[in-house]
């Protein structure tokens, strides 16, 4: 089974986390199932950017971006070439290294 290595994030996983995940699962679902409370304001329907992550290693093993995902990513805080929406990025055969951005754009979050 591939592993996802979440780099340290001040609030969500201060020490970083390594999890094993089944191929075919989204990064967002894998994170949530393992106690990493990544935001997902649109309930994982590709209608916001709150689950935006950076794929630091393993990008080539993920499914390709859809046009809808690319349109949403254009609105993400801190967009870079390694950006994906974790609700749309499906784990393949390779291990992944994920960085969760420090900030997210979520106008309706009760946590802000």
Image: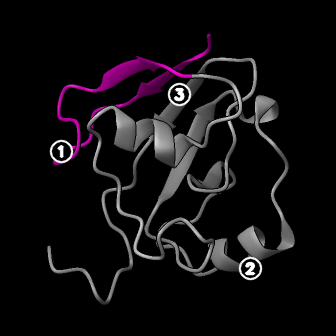
Q: Position of residue 63 (x, y in %)?
A: 81, 43
Q: Is residue 71 above or below residue 51?
A: below
Q: Position of residue 45 (x, y in %)?
A: 60, 71
What is the number of the mark on residue 10? 1
- Crowdedness of circle 3 by 10 Å Cα count: few (<14), some, many (20+)? some
What is the number of the mark on residue 71? 2
Distance from Cα at disc 1 to Cα at disc 3: 17 Å
Colour convention:
one colour
Which residue is pictured at 61% across the width and 15% down the height?
A: 2
Within the image, what quadrant is residue 80 found in?
bottom right
Q: Is residue 23 above or below residue 70?
A: above
What is the number of the mark on residue 104? none
Which residue is pictured at 72% across the width and 69% down the height?
A: 69
Q: Which part of the image, by quadrant, shows the C terminus?
A: bottom left
Which residue is pictured at 69% across the width and 54% down the height?
A: 81
- Crowdedness of circle 1 by 10 Å Cα count: few (<14), some, many (20+)? few
Within the image, what quadrant is residue 65 found in?
bottom right
Distance from Cα at disc 2 to Cα at disc 3: 24 Å
Task: Give the main secondary structure, helix, strand or loop, of the magenta stretch.
Answer: loop
On the image, numbered disc 3 is attached to which residue? 97
Q: Position of residue 9 (x, y in %)?
A: 26, 42
Q: In the drawing, does residue 11 fall left or right of residue 103?
A: left
Q: Earlier in the sequence, mark 1 or mark 2?
A: 1
Which residue is pictured at 54% across the width and 22% down the height?
A: 21
Q: Earlier in the sequence, mark 1 or mark 3?
A: 1
- The reply to whether dot 1 and dot 2 touch (C-beta < 8 Å) is no
Distance from Cα at disc 1 to Cα at disc 2: 28 Å
Which region of the structure is painted magenta?
Answer: 1-21
Q: Is residue 84 above or below residue 9?
A: below
């Amino acid at each position: 089974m591939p592993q996802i290595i979440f780099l340290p994030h001040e609030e969500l996983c201060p020490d970083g986390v390594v999890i094993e995940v089944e191929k075919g699962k989204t990064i967002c679902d894998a994170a949530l199932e393992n106690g990493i409370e990544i935001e997902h304001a649109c309930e994982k329907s590709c209608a916001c950017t709150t689950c935006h992550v950076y794929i630091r290693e393993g990008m080539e093993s993920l499914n390709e971006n859809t046009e809808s995902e690319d349109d949403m990513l254009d609105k993400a805080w801190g967009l870079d070439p390694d950006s994906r929406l974790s609700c749309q990025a499906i784990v393949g055969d390779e291990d992944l290294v994920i960085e969760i951005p420090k900030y997210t754009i979520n106008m309706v979050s009760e946590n802000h």
